[in-house]
Image (cartoon, grey):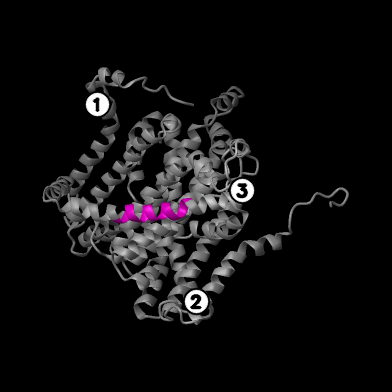
Amino acid sequence: MSKVTIRNRTDVAKGGLLRRLAGRGIFLYPIIVVLIVWECVARFGGFPPTMLPPFSVVAEQFVSLLISGELIAVTAVTLQRAALGLVIAILVGVPVGLAMSRSKLAKWFFEPLVSFGFSTPTITLLPVFILWFGTGYLSEVLLVALSCFFTIALSTYDGAKNVSTVIVWSAQAMGTRERDLPHRIVLPAAITFIFAGIRVALPLAVIIAVLAEMIGGGGGLGYMLMYGYRFLDAPSAFAALLAILLLGLLIDQALLWSRRIFLPWEADANEK
Amino acid sequence: MTARGLVYKGPAATVRFLSWVAPLAILAALWEALSQSGLVNKSVLPPFSEVVQQIVSMIIGGELALQLSVSLYRALIGFVVGATIGVIIGVTMAMVPIVRRCVYPLVTLTYALPKSALIPIALLWLGVGDSSVILCVVFGAAVPLIINSFHGAESVPEVQIWSAESMGASRARVFFSVILPSALPQILTGLRMSLPLSFILVISAEMVASFVGIGNFIFAFGNAGSYSSMFGAIIMVMAVAFAIDQFLKFISAYLLRWTESESSHV
């Protein structure tokens, strides 16, 4: 069931910043309550500060890291890895998915591989990548790429499979060459599913990037988390956690926003 | 050509199975060829046959079973606890509006947070050991289940609830006979999502802070340089994870055989 959507932008703007904020505010109350509880428990609960620093200390550390630019640099490293891996996954996964939908041979060959790989924890392959490419950048990027590849290939395949055959027939009837079909007809029609796949794969890319950093090191938010643990620098660890959380939220918002731009007809379908 | 009264159902199950396995077999053959021919350094890519040898000796030696059972134990406990908590919270959210307004923002936040990021925090709190891993798994399993059971319970057609109530069903009866079965597909989807996730979290945690468990097992081989055992362990883990996923698919197909749904292969 579609909810009532805002009719045009001026509606919202006129509706009042205050009203919008108040609406959002209700959303925030439980979070604020949790933060207050955190602060009290941390200060008066007798936990050692290395275990549970009060939220104020964490926030302080977070802000100071932000100002010194260190947090941005670290986040950029992680994001770079995730983005690079995701791009590779898209470049390989979309053609594979398309091929799987059009060619029976491709489907026969790739389906076992993709569905096998999809349900297995790709993180187990990290030692293999480290063996082949050493610790650091390349192995982690490739791990991200591999993990996202399965998701993207599968959703592209799903989407391409479901392209209405009527569309394909009309294109063929109008003389489209067989080899033009994939990129001129199937791809645009499947873009919704592909985008859905990317929507799942992007957070996955960030998660795997952070995980790979935690295990393999090499800078980035994951490394900062582990550093906090190893040196009992709890505020830094929590600050890194906070950064990861915010990053996740930002990415999801960015995705929703870009979907509204690129696929405006999808906007009402499901916002969550 | 069909025999009278019989419908051709396609090639026999064994043929289908073999045809599914074939690409994997081709890959294995390629692997063996690549390694044995010396094109790729043997220490970097040990021959498939050697890897299989190691797998067999690990299985026989019992070490594989030991490590796997430790990891599975952690994953299962965390999964059961987390899933139960998740379902309870999710369904309560759907049924009691106040709970929903309080908990929903928190759930959105935890949804955005990758649970593997909690590993170092859990390590800070509980040190290296079973409990920190299980704690992470509890979180990891709970969140998808909260969301899925919430949506499942929420989308129960009100007509059904009303009919049940008008026929005199008590609150409890309504819950168990109407809401729960209707929410079951979503809950099962959530379970299907969080069991592999639990397993992944356990392995990740073990890889991050090496202690007993299959994650550590793999890394230890890597550090010791016995790469064929490392590959072997990795393959076994992937096989187990795959088996778990197939098993879950099978169970949910069985439990949901009364629902009408287009079969999806994910």
Query: Badge 1 sits on which subunit?
Result: A
Can the viewer see residue B98 in this picture? yes
> Dot 1: within a 10 Å radius of its alpha carbon, few (fewer than 14), some, or many (20 or more) residues?
few
From the viewer's side, name the closer residue of A127 and B251.
A127
Cα distance, mark 2 to mark 1? 62 Å
Marks 2 and 1 belong to one chain: no
Q: What residue type is disc 2 on?
A: Leu
Labelled disc at residue B253: 3
What residue range appears in magenta? A81-94
* Closer to the camera in the image, A136 or B81: A136
Which badge, 2 or 3, comes first in the chain's sequence?
2
Mark 2–mark 3 Cα distance, whole angstroms, equals 40 Å
Would residue B239 be found to the left or right of residue B138 on screen?
Answer: right
Residue ID for mark 1: A21
For residue A254, above or below residue B136: above
Whether B81 is among the magenta residues is no
Residue B210 % position (x, y): 33, 69
Q: Main secondary structure of the magenta part?
A: helix
- Looking at the rendered structure, the kind of residue marked 1 is Leu
Q: Residue at x 59, y 55 (%)?
A: A107
Q: Identify whether A117 is placed above or below A176.
A: below
Q: Would you name the residue on which mark 2 appears?
A: B34
Q: Which one is nearer the viewer's eye here, A77 or A125? A: A77
Quadrant for the C terminus of chain A in the image: top left
Nearer to us: label 2 or label 1 = 2
Task: Name the residue at 46% across, 26% down.
Answer: A2
